[in-house]
């Protein structure tokens, strides 16, 4: 009962305007920045707010919004909260904050928190790590006369798995600068660590520092620079600090590899890469110091080989399933004799795995036959009575029933509807989906098979994700800018799309991509619920994602559906549009966001991405190429899936290659080929770049080593925009097992990344 006062202060310099503290509670304006309490400027950069809060609530979350010119929101990645548990009516807490900007907050995203530093929260690291608690587990100690209770809060994102954060200081109660007597801290999530101690008022102003200890208790990293120093406001006996760990290495930089799941080849692949093949790629990353695997979209795209033509934003593509693993699942679950089907699986691997390109129709047909046979062998009854399957089905209820109904209805529409590819023309609406998927309906056997396939895709991808996390490797997915008209999304929620228009791009000729633009006004009416569901679903499997054509979140080239001659929508207010749309989806998950911001980029885009902590993309041949001047908040790449790998570029665009050679090498005549040392130079430039990430296609990495190159670099391209022939059929010419055996090359790559400072935590 009663109220406590939070005496909140922050140092932040602005010329004009005001700073507000917003949050979900009534005291902080219920996230309405116009109702949020305003801070008072106390001169210079000092801002204060005295706020009474009811003690009936244990924890208050809040964040800062600077309302000056272009409003600036504090990063929402690291949640700010203060617990008032244990306080009495009339108590005052001196809360001394710092503004949490997006640049350092990026390291609290799932790519780092769950994978690179968290290593999947493996049990073997639990004992030596900081204890994990919730904010409402924290409790203020009742002060004694002459004492001050200090709660230290520090943001320390770069803490290796098994390491721990401590605070030590001048007072005796803080160890008197002795590391062996330092104050232990707890982890409250998002890389925020809390420690609490009582000190004498005579010990204030406090001097202290944070340190990171390894599994043995030895100091792994000490803060650089001067000691932290804090005083307390008169009349306060409780104080909460808000610090950031001062690392000797200021900017963390890392490296990754880009390759589509479909293009991975192992000895177990069935003519196409499969989710479980990612485990071999993870092994290679762990061997070479790469910390991220970037893939192309993995959603079901039906018969269209392009991964950007998804027929569902939730369902996974059936081609990525491994039938032999399904057999093993039911052998273990029910003791079913699957020997015959395992033999079929092995024969199919031998039959399709020698193909140097993906034969999409054949892969889909053969896998469909085999998965249907597995379903029939196990029986529908046994498949459905599986408790794990039922738990999954219940959890995925928000999309999987509609998707299954969509797949069943699609097969029917193709038999009589010559516009089956546009779900808005279908005679059966999504409102009838419940009837289609009813257990006693005539189509339920087909519905159950859809569930069955999606469940095992989920299980296999989740296995790969967990394996990657434990090895400290993040998985980065890809979100297409649109969904096709023949999709479960358009069928189920047509009001979210502008079905009378097509998205595209200006030019001569004008590009018409064929899919409907988003109806953002309709999406915002329910808080972008469709986007938020989509990203929460995606976060099961990924730690980061790439937004294809992120410019479409600011404006889209919209063309009449049955005509030409489009225009940009909106034509103005791009900053506001981009902030509104991107902020809505950013808060849906904790994944790291990267935006494909290539092409004709409006001036409003880079500042918004920077403000939100969304990384941009830099392809060397498409910008000034000065890798040593790239923005830290970017991904540096030698090439990507939409252009030729470096070796092919060298052969196809000799003039550009010669210009690159003269500028970056500047000695001798530009060589043909090019030789492997040229590609080594290109990759080294990217490794040494100032970008947070360098993520290069596996083709470019392998081209650094003569003996690992493909015979014909023309076969190494994945997609040529505007063409269909030869696109989306690429398979790596080497099996991952072969690449793992290339010990000399792997050591060379690891040495290059290490010497460039990539992956250095402390």
Image (tube, grey):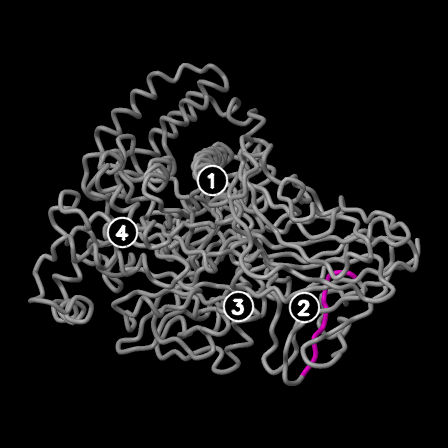
The percent position of residue 712, horizontal first and vertical second, equals 12, 50
Q: Which residue is mark 3?
A: 519
Q: Which mark is residue 419?
A: none
Of residues 618 and 446, the one nearer the viewer is 618
* Secondary-structure class at tag 2: strand
Task: Answer few, some or many: residues within 10 Å of disc 3's Cα (few below 14, many 20 plus, some between 14 and 19).
Answer: some
* Figure check: 363 above or below 567: above
Q: Which residue is mark 4?
A: 728
Label 1 – label 4 distance at C-alpha: 28 Å
* Secondary-structure class at tag 4: loop
Are the residues tagged 2 and 3 within 8 Å (C-beta)?
no
Which mark's residue is nearer the viewer, 3 or 4?
4
Residue drawn at 28 percent across, 69 percent down: 625
- Range shown magenta: 17-25
Q: Which residue is mark 1?
A: 469
Are the residues tagged 1 and 4 within 8 Å (C-beta)?
no
* Figure check: 50 above or below 141: below
Label 2 – label 4 distance at C-alpha: 46 Å
Of residues 364 and 118, the one nearer the viewer is 118
Q: Which mark is residue 64?
A: 2
Label 3 – label 4 distance at C-alpha: 29 Å
Residue 695 figure quarter = bottom left
Which mark's residue is nearer the viewer, 1 or 4?
1
Please give left or right for residue 236 compared with residue 176 in the image.
Answer: right
Task: Answer few, some or many: residues within 10 Å of disc 2's Cα (few below 14, many 20 plus, some between 14 and 19).
Answer: many
């Amino acid at each position: 009962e009663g109220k406590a006062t939070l005496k909140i202060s922050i140092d932040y310099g602005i010329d004009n305007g005001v700073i507000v503290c917003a949050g979900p509670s009534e005291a902080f304006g219920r996230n309405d920045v116009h109702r949020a309490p305003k801070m008072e400027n106390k001169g210079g950069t000092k801002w204060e707010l005295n706020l009474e809060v009811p003690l009936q609530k244990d924890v208050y979350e809040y964040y800062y919004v600077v309302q000056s010119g272009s409003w600036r929101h504090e990063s929402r990645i690291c949640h700010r909260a203060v617990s008032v548990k244990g306080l009495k009516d009339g108590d005052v807490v001196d809360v001394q904050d710092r503004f949490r900007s997006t640049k350092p907050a990026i390291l609290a995203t799932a790519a780092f928190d769950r994978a690179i530093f968290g290593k999947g929260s493996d049990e073997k690291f639990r004992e030596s790590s900081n204890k994990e608690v919730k904010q409402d587990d924290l409790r203020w100690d009742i002060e004694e006369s002459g004492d001050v209770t200090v709660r230290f809060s520090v943001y320390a994102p770069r803490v290796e798995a098994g390491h721990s954060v401590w605070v030590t200081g001048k007072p005796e109660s803080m160890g008197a600068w002795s590391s062996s007597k330092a104050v232990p801290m707890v982890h409250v999530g998002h890389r925020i660590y809390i420690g609490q101690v009582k000190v004498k008022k005579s010990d204030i102003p406090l001097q202290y520092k944070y340190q990171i200890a390894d599994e043995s208790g030895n100091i792994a990293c000490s803060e650089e620079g001067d000691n932290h120093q804090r005083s307390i406001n008169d009349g306060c006996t409780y104080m909460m600090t808000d610090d950031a760990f001062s690392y000797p290495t200021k900017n963390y930089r890392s490296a990754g590899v880009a390759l589509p799941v479909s293009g991975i080849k192992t000895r177990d692949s069935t003519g196409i890469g499969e989710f479980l093949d990612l485990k071999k790629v993870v092994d290679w990353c762990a061997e070479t110091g790469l910390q991220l695997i970037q893939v192309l979209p993995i959603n079901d795209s039906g018969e269209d080989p392009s991964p950007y033509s998804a027929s569902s934003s939730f369902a996974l593509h059936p081609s990525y399933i491994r039938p032999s693993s399904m057999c093993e699942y039911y052998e273990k679950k029910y003791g079913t004799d699957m020997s015959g089907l395992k033999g079929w699986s092995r024969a199919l691997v031998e039959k399709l795995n020698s193909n140097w390109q993906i034969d999409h129709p054949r892969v889909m047909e053969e896998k469909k036959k085999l998965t249907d046979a597995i379903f029939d062998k196990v029986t529908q009854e046994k498949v459905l009575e599986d408790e794990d399957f039922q738990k999954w089905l219940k959890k995925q209820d928000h999309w999987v029933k509609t998707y299954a109904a969509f797949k069943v209805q699609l097969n029917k529409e193709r038999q009589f509807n010559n516009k089956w590819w546009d779900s808005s023309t279908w005679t059966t609406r999504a409102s009838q989906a419940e009837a289609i998927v009813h257990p006693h309906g005539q189509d339920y056997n087909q519905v159950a098979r859809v569930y069955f396939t999606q469940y095992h895709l989920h299980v296999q991808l989740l296995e790969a994700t967990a394996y990657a996390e434990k090895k400290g490797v993040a998985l980065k997915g890809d979100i297409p800018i649109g969904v096709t008209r023949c999709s479960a999304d358009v069928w189920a929620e047509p009001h979210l799309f502008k079905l009378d228009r097509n998205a595209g791009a200006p030019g001569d000729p004008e590009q018409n991509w064929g899919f409907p633009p988003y109806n953002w006004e309709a999406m915002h009416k329910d808080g972008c619920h469709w986007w938020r569901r989509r990203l929460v679903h995606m976060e099961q499997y990924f730690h980061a994602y790439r937004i294809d054509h992120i410019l479409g979140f600011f404006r889209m080239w919209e063309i009449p559906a049955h005509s030409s001659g489009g225009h940009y929508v909106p034509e103005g207010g791009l900053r506001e549009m981009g902030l509104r749309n991107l902020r809505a989806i950013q808060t849906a998950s904790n994944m790291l966001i990267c935006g494909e911001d290539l092409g004709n980029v409006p001036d409003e885009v880079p500042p918004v991405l920077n403000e939100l902590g969304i990384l941009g993309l830099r392809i060397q041949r498409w910008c000034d190429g000065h890798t040593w001047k790239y923005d830290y908040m970017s991904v540096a790449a030698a090439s990507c899936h939409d252009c030729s790998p470096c070796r092919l570029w060298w052969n196809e665009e000799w003039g550009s290659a010669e210009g690159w050679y003269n500028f970056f090498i500047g000695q001798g005549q530009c060589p043909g080929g090019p030789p492997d040392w040229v590609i080594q130079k290109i990759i080294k430039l990217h490794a040494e770049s100032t970008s947070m990430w360098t993520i290069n296609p596996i083709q470019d990495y392998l081209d650094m080593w003569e003996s690992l190159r493909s015979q014909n670099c023309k076969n190494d391209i994945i997609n040529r925009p505007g063409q269909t022939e030869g696109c989306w059929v690429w398979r790596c010419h080497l099996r991952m097992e072969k690449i793992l055996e290339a010990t000399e090359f792997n050591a060379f790559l690891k040495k290059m990344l290490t010497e460039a400072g990539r992956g250095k935590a402390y």
